[in-house]
């Protein structure tokens, strides 16, 4: 750096970025905003992939893992086929597949697909109804959270009553259904759903837009990582001693209940540590978003160091960002791990 | 609790690492100034110029794009061709006496400057726009412009997009880390048009996304758009809009603070232009050695010692012209009448014919 006459420093973060990015959660205007701001927008875009990615991966992975023990031949083989195909193809190729062969191949905006007048699909992205982000949604969301906690508490109380006093729990069940109905009403009417309105060809107002780039990276990551999670779940379930299965059957539990009440809680102890590393992989692999044109932190940082001529500083920023992100995932998973471990006395 | 403190410690360690890196260059300077007399001497004695490294190595490592027909393009047999490639060949001929002593590196637009700064390549000859910030804060040296270009916009012929206002609400594909990316933002701002920019790391995915209809517009240097259009599935279906969004002077680049090497690249490039002005070409260069004109005699090294001043042989331009010809020949072969693009010279003509090419005197 000395040789080329440039100096190390982070002052450039305050200078005007002057390049536009495709999408951003926070308001970003290339006319006034700085490199620091655009990097933050990129980071939030990364989180926008990583957080839903982790949730969806967990759901899909557990589903595929549990299904591999199913008595249904089709489901069992389907799960096997999915895992073997997805695990053996490089992620980058899969991302290209999702982007180039699926989301870019959707019809152009003039011939977009539409369902129920509220869901639109074109090569510009997927448009879905979505709650407007205002006080109404906020208060409804808090009310929903309270409801969920109440349901959880009621459920435990009911189980306790049924176990300890042998009551049928019918009245509590009724209360649970009532709460569920309230929750449903709250979600449907209280969230202030906005339906995408077509203002001009291809331009929509309101609702949620998942751009083709975002959809490609999210789909690619979820489907790829889930295949690994599925194998971890399968291994975890197999690690539970056969006697546990047989004991549960002997008590007359059906196979679904055996899995849910007896086997899975024990399998969690084995599942969580390797799951941790798959979660971190997902977070790190999200940097491949650049291949499909999604503006995540890595993509923004690449442009930034190029335009500002600051490779060393920007690389440091990305490294520290990913490090902190992974440490946070790790910390959460370790806490979770402590909760499910056997307490030795 | 223990877990959390370990997380905290690791973060602290990372921060420490960062500050350590931050202060490293300063400690270097301090060490050099205090007791590092001998280290300074060795760098000074060997000249520490890229030029010596290249002569020792026997090959020139030249950073090119590799994907733009007419500028730098790899064909099926792995042969490179194009105006940028010919510049690399001219420099190799001047320094090493052999136009084929070049190793090409394909670089994308975001990695080119780091590759140059890290010493992976000796020079860039890769459609790089000369701007003040690249010249100063990025730490580069720009040799004379070899192609005067302007930014254009390619759209589908049947899309009915004619002015920049028609782009409102459309998607535009662009390559990351380029001046075109910045100019696009500026131009949309100026016209107060809201359009979606889809940024790609490399040119190939960007053009592929445009070809597949992800974007209604594709923006880049006009010459590049014309060249790239020839590689699209149906070139006739795409047109360039009648707008010029910026000035794009493209030329070879070397790293800052190495004047010995920069001078070579600079004057070889000027030499190509001067040769055209003096009407010396591949066919007549041997005859011209007999010329009575003192300008030509000096230029070709028959008289004087112009080559020595930049640590080359006096007849370096003879070798260059024999291998690649003068600028006019390079242009016609790659972009002009002898190529599939048939681009008129326009601004890229000699100053004597109304163009912008002008070489300072060789004396």
Image: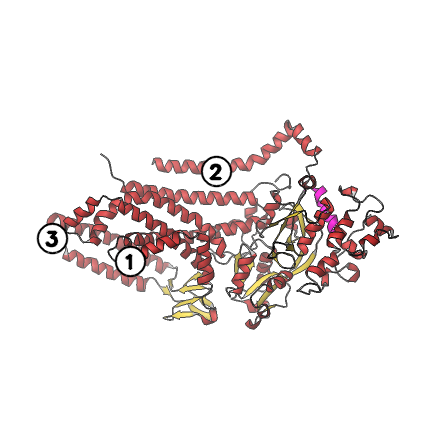
Query: Dot 1 corresponds to which residue?
Result: A75
Tell me the mark number nearer the camera, choosing from 1 and 2: 1
What chain does mark 2 sit on? B
Query: Dot 3 corresponds to which residue?
Result: A167
Quadrant position of the C terminus of chain A in the picture: top left
Q: Position of residue A315 (x, y in %)?
A: 52, 44
Q: CA distance from mark 3 to mark 1?
A: 38 Å
Q: Position of residue A328 (x, y in %)?
A: 39, 43
Q: Is residue B269 within the magenta segment?
A: yes
The residue positioned farthest toward the right in the image shown: B292
**Is residue A54 visible to us here?**
no
Q: Residue visible at 51% across and 38% down?
A: B18
Label 3 SS: loop
Label 2 SS: helix
Q: Do dots 3 and 1 share one subunit?
A: yes
Query: Dot 2 corresponds to which residue?
Result: B15
């Amino acid at each position: 750096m000395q040789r080329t006459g440039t100096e190390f420093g982070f002052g450039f973060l305050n200078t005007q970025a002057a390049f536009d990015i495709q999408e951003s959660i926070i308001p970003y205007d290339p006319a006034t905003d700085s490199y620091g701001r655009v990097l933050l927008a990129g980071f939030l875009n990364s989180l926008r992939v990583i957080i839903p990615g982790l949730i969806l991966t967990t759901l899909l992975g557990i589903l595929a893992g549990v299904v591999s023990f199913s008595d249904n031949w089709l489901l069992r083989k389907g799960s096997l086929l999915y895992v073997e195909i997805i695990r053996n193809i490089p992620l980058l190729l899969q991302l290209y597949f999702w982007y180039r062969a699926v989301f870019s191949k959707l019809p152009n905006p003039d011939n977009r697909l539409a369902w129920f007048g509220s869901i639109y699909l074109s090569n510009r992205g997927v448009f879905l109804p979505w709650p407007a982000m205002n006080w109404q949604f906020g208060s409804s969301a808090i009310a929903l959270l309270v409801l969920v906690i109440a349901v959880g508490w009621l459920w435990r109380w009911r189980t306790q009553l049924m176990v300890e006093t042998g009551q049928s729990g019918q009245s509590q069940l009724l209360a649970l259904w009532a709460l569920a109905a309230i929750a449903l009403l709250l979600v449907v009417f209280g969230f202030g759903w906005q339906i995408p309105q077509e203002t001009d060809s291809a331009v929509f107002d309101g609702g949620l837009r998942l751009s083709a780039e975002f959809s490609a990276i999210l789909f690619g990551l979820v489907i790829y990582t889930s295949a690994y999670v599925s194998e971890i779940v399968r291994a975890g379930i197999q690690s539970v001693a056969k006697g546990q299965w047989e004991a549960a059957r002997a008590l007359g539990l059906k196979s679904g209940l055996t899995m849910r009440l007896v086997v899975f809680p024990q399998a969690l102890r084995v599942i969580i540590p390797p799951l941790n590393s798959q979660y971190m992989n997902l977070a790190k692999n999200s940097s491949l978003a650049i291949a499909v044109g999604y503006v995540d932190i890595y993509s923004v940082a690449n442009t930034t160091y190029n335009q500002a001529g600051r490779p060393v500083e920007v690389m440091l920023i990305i490294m520290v960002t990913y490090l902190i992100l992974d440490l946070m995932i790790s910390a959460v998973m370790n806490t979770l791990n402590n909760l499910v471990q056997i307490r030795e006395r | 609790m223990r877990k959390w403190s370990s997380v905290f410690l690791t973060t602290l360690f990372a921060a420490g690492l960062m500050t350590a890196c931050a202060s490293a260059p300063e400690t270097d300077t301090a060490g050099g100034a205090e007791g590092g007399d001998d280290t300074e001497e060795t760098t000074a004695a060997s000249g520490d110029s890229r030029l010596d490294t290249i002569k020792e190595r026997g090959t020139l490592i030249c950073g090119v794009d590799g994907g733009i027909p007419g500028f730098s393009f790899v064909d099926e047999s792995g042969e490179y061709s194009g105006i940028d490639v010919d510049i690399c060949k001219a420099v190799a001929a001047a320094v090493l006496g052999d136009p084929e002593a070049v190793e090409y590196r394909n670089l994308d637009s975001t990695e080119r400057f780091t590759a140059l700064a890290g010493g992976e390549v000796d020079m860039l000859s890769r459609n790089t726009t000369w701007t003040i910030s690249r010249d100063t804060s990025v730490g580069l040296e720009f040799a004379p412009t070899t192609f005067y270009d302007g930014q254009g916009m390619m759209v589908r012929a049947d899309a009915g997009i004619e002015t920049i206002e028609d782009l409102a609400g459309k998607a535009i594909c662009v390559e990351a880390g380029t001046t075109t990316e910045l100019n696009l933002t500026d131009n949309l701002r100026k016209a107060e048009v809201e359009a979606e920019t889809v940024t790609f790391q490399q040119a190939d995915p960007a053009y592929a996304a445009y070809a597949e209809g992800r974007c209604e517009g594709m923006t880049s240097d006009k010459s590049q758009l014309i060249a790239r259009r020839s590689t699209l599935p149906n070139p006739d279906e795409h047109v360039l809009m009648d707008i010029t969004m910026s000035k794009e002077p493209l030329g070879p680049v070397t790293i800052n603070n190495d004047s010995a090497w920069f001078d070579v690249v600079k004057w070889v490039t000027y030499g190509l232009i001067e040769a055209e002005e003096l009407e010396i070409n591949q066919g007549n260069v041997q005859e011209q050695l007999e010329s009575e004109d003192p300008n030509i005699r000096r230029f070709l090294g028959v008289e004087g010692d112009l080559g020595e001043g930049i640590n080359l042989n006096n007849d370096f331009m003879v070798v260059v012209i024999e291998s690649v010809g003068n600028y006019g020949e390079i242009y016609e072969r790659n972009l002009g009448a002898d190529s599939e693009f048939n681009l008129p010279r326009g601004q890229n003509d000699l100053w004597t014919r109304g163009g912008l090419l002008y070489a300072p005197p060789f004396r």
